[in-house]
Image (cartoon, rainbow, N blue to C red):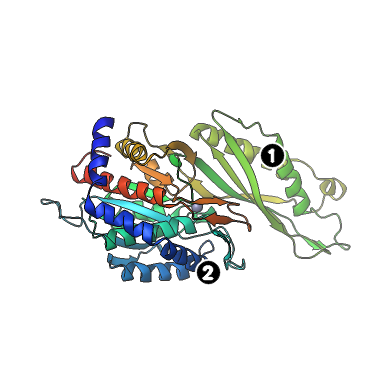
Amino acid sequence: MTHTAQLRIARLAANPAVHRAFHWLHLHQPQLRRWHLEILRIPAPPFGEQARAAWFLERFQQLGLADPHIDDAGNVLAELPAASRTSNREPRTAPLILLSAHLDTVFPSTTPTDPTEIDTRILAPGACDNAAGLSGLLGLAAAFRHAQLLPAVPILFAANVGEEGEGDLRGMRHLFTQSPYANRIAAAIALEGGGASGVVTCALASRRFRVTVTGPGGHSWNNAGAPNPILILARALLSLESLDLPHANPRTTLNIGQISGGTSVNSIPESASASIDLRSTDATLLHEAEIALRQSLEQWVIDAPTPAARSKPSAAPPTLTIETIGDRPAGALADEAPLLVTLRAVDRHLNLRTEPGLGSTDANIPLSLGVPAIAIGAGGLGGGIHTLQEWYDPTGRNPALRRILLTLLDTAQLAAQNTTL
Ligand SMILES: [Zn+2]
């Protein structure tokens, strides 16, 4: 199988149209950089991807892709048609390959996003995650179109919403469950940030919660002694430090990522809340960790008498609510899956390395549904991901783009032959 995969890749790489596509990418790095900078200038906070989506729709239209549109979830979609319609199959049910990159960033709408350039580096929030994936997506679409390179089954290009944080993979979830494409996607490749070696083949399960403690509130002097939700929440969160989470094999992690509450320095707050991210390589352990987390919070908010309750037993007791704000399912691509065999063969051909790894990405959704999927870097180098110091350097991103292009073409061929991917 490996041997035949290697032969198929060598044959693909010898195709003149593939050469033209590689050549286009080689010559048009400045164009990819311009797109990259334009993307960064349009903020795309969680649940606020519309402006960036509109920009993408125009690019898809300009490139002459088929049926460019924005779907019900806000994903921007367009198709690259196949070389020839698979004879006996309805075009609307025929398989296709999804190539996606998420539009959203983790930064709120108030974050200035204008990029600065220092030599070849681009500095901006979201410069790598995921402007690298987005500009790579456009670059690949453009290379296919300019080279008149047609895949064996259609490629669905998607600039999708809702990958980060509380977006909870809603763009992908829609595509794979409600969208007319839901049952047609034979394999999915998500472009995620930079790099040219790491490939996510195993989807990390995660559960996310918003924990809120409420109390009667009041004046800091007149109502002194009423339960203070900030203090109670702080104590309850500290208790989570002593949860016994396995560090390795399987690894389980807990992060308290945000905290908020109160209205002014001289008011006893009426509420305080925190958001918590729990992840594990093992679904059972994730479930157990969630139970332990809930018990610990209940014990410290509901059961433990606070100093205030002891001194002023008449005060209304605090309440606790735990809301699930994220649920990312687990899944994994088998080591011998054709998509991975193809990728390894492409890497041998291009002298790159595949390092399969774990991640919580858009690939979680297809993987959890048994659709072969990977999340893969779009080349170049990046750092400071999810911080205001985020940067990206596109130098040398071309091999990674060639890698994705060849992987797409070979996977499309396999899908056209009805090979189980
Ligand atoms: Zn990302």
Does residue 159 show up? yes
In the drawing, what numbered circle is on residue 240?
Answer: 1
State which mark lies toward you, 2 or 1. 2
* Contact, mark 2 vs mark 1 (Cβ under 8 Å): no
Label 2: how many Cα within 10 Å (few below 14, some 14–19, many 20+): some
Q: Which residue is mark 2?
A: 41
Out of 189 and 380, give the one closest to the viewer. Answer: 380
Left or right placement of residue 144 versus residue 101 in this view: left
In the image, what residue occupies the spot 76% across and 41% down? 304
For this orientation, the residue located farthest to the left is 88
Does residue 369 show up? no
In the image, what residue occupies the spot 31% across and 62% down? 78
The first of marks 2 and 1 along the sequence is 2
Quadrant of the frame with the C terminus? top left
Left or right placement of residue 336 versus residue 380 in this view: left
Residue 285 screen position, x and y as percent: 54, 32
Label 1: how many Cα within 10 Å (few below 14, some 14–19, many 20+): some
Give the structural element (helix, strand or loop) at label 1: helix
Residue 408 screen position, x and y as percent: 30, 48
Callout 1 amino acid? Leu
Which quadrant would residue 332 be assigned to in this image?
top left
